[in-house]
Image (cartoon, grey):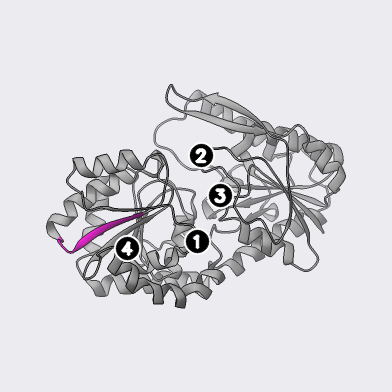
């Protein structure tokens, strides 16, 4: 089965999945991707070995969302030529995050009569009525979705969305978003050996640690965590906040920490390789905004989680009250209350961390993820086209 992935870029956190696909017996895997977007997190990983890939000539289309915010979309004029040359049995498409290229991709797939697996987070609920642009976006996405053969969601929330749209159940698959848990497990002994020296270096001996891991960007809402930490530290003087990640928003966060009296917040900068020891320092992972892949990595390290609704995977990974808590985005009082209850006893933290580790081991590791992904590809490649393109 020849599988061609079409993706904006090949981010470092997805590369283990692509390598596993390429090494799978019976699968010939090729990744087609665009160029880096300098100054953003939309960049290709530094190590793309282990699978066939090709960077396509990329045009950058810019859409102004607000006076301060713009979205850049890649467009690949040579995509049709690449698809004709590769002759795939099935295309794995990135979903609606790149609409201009998605239209070109679906048009090519229909002309070439190649089935498409639409890989998507579905539709994340937002407070309030949708704007006109959001309604238009959803109409365009569903137009494209109806012309696909199978649907692969990041979470059960995405699966619910597919069913609400009326897509046949046999065409809907869910692979809960996670990191390569096998690789994390293999690195655990080394991470635990390195953690004491790192703890001493960061002056965290005898401290309990709230941990954030991720890009430093406004949509991560790290300001919320810093504000809550400043209040919690008044009741828990042994508490420290460790922020692992880089990005242009760091200077804003450092200024906010000073403004709320959380000057001792530790900013490490970006850490990609060797992040394991930092997870070993944490007592609770806190994700107050968008983001989800750090959840499965932290749970593999045995950490409880406090997170908001992001890409939907947190609803599958976090059992509220057992392995962590899911809180409302922007509700600082709720975030403070949940963290305060968790910090009231170390035994409670250990129990929640152990519960999270069992969820990874028993339900949502990289093995189960790959099985669902491959099942969607095999279904699409072998599906009879009784369901005509455009039929919902």
- In reply to whether residue 81 is colored magenta, the answer given is no
Q: Are marks 3 and 4 in contact (CB under 8 Å)?
A: no
Q: Earlier in the sequence, mark 3 or mark 2?
A: 2
Q: State the predominant SS element of the stretch in magenta.
A: strand
The Cα atoms of the two marked residues, 1 and 2, are separated by 19 Å
Using the numbered discs, state the Cα–Cα distance from disc 3 to disc 2 in whole angstroms: 26 Å
Q: Nearer the viewer, residue 271 or 283?
A: 271
Q: Residue 113: give x, y in percent of width and height.
A: 85, 43
Mark 4 in CB contact with mark 2 (< 8 angstroms): no
Q: What range is drawn magenta here?
A: 236-243
- Of badges 1 and 4, nearer the viewer stands 1
Q: Which residue is mark 3?
A: 158
Q: Which mark is residue 51?
A: none
**Location of mark 2 (residue):** 40
**Disc 1 element:** loop
Q: Earlier in the sequence, mark 3 or mark 4?
A: 3
Q: Position of residue 296 (x, y in %)?
A: 47, 63
What residue is rendered at 62% in x and 27% in y? Answer: 61
Which comes before the other along the chain, label 3 or label 1? Answer: 3
Mark 3, secondary structure of its residue: helix
Q: Measured from the top left, where is residue 233 in percent x and y?
A: 17, 56
Q: Which residue is disc 1 drawn over?
A: 273
């Amino acid at each position: 089965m020849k599988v061609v992935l079409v993706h904006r870029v090949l981010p470092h956190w997805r590369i283990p999945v692509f390598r596993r696909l390429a090494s799978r017996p019976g699968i010939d895997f090729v990744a087609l991707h665009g160029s880096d977007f300098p100054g953003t997190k939309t960049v290709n990983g530094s190590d793309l070995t282990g699978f066939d890939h090709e960077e396509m000539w990329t045009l950058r289309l810019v859409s102004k969302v607000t006076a301060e915010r713009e979205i850049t979309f890649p467009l690949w004029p040579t995509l049709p030529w690449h698809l004709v040359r590769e002759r795939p049995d099935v295309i794995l498409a990135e979903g609606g995050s790149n609409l201009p290229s998605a239209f070109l991709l679906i048009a090519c797939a229909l002309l070439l009569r190649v089935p498409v697996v639409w890989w998507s987070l579905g539709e994340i609920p937002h407070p309030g009525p949708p704007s006109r642009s959001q309604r238009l976006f959803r109409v365009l996405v569903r137009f494209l979705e109806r012309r696909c053969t199978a649907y692969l969601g990041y979470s059960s929330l995405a699966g619910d969305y597919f069913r609400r749209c009326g897509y046949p159940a046999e065409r809907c698959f869910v692979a809960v978003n996670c990191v390569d848990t096998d690789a994390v497990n293999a690195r655990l002994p080394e991470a635990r050996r390195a953690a004491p020296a790192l703890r001493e270096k960061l002056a965290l001996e005898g401290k309990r640690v709230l941990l954030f891991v991720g890009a430093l960007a406004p949509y991560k809402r790290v300001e919320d965590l810093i504000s809550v930490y400043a209040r919690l530290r008044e009741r828990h003087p042994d508490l420290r906040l460790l922020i692992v990640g880089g990005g242009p928003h760091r200077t804003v966060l450092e200024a906010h920490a000073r403004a709320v009296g959380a000057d001792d917040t530790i900013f490490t900068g970006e850490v990609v390789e060797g992040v394991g020891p930092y997870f070993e320092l944490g007592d609770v992972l806190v994700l107050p905004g968008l983001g989800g892949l750090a959840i499965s990595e932290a749970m593999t390290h045995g950490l409880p989680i406090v997170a908001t609704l992001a890409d939907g995977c947190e609803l599958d990974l976090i059992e509220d009250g057992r392995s962590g808590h899911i809180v409302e985005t922007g509700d600082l009082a709720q975030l403070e209350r949940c963290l305060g209850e968790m910090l009231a006893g170390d035994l409670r933290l250990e129990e929640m961390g152990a519960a999270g580790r069992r969820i990874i081991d028993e339900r949502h590791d990289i093995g189960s993820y790959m099985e669902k992904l491959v099942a969607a590809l095999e279904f699409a490649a072998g599906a009879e086209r009784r369901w005509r393109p455009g039929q919902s």
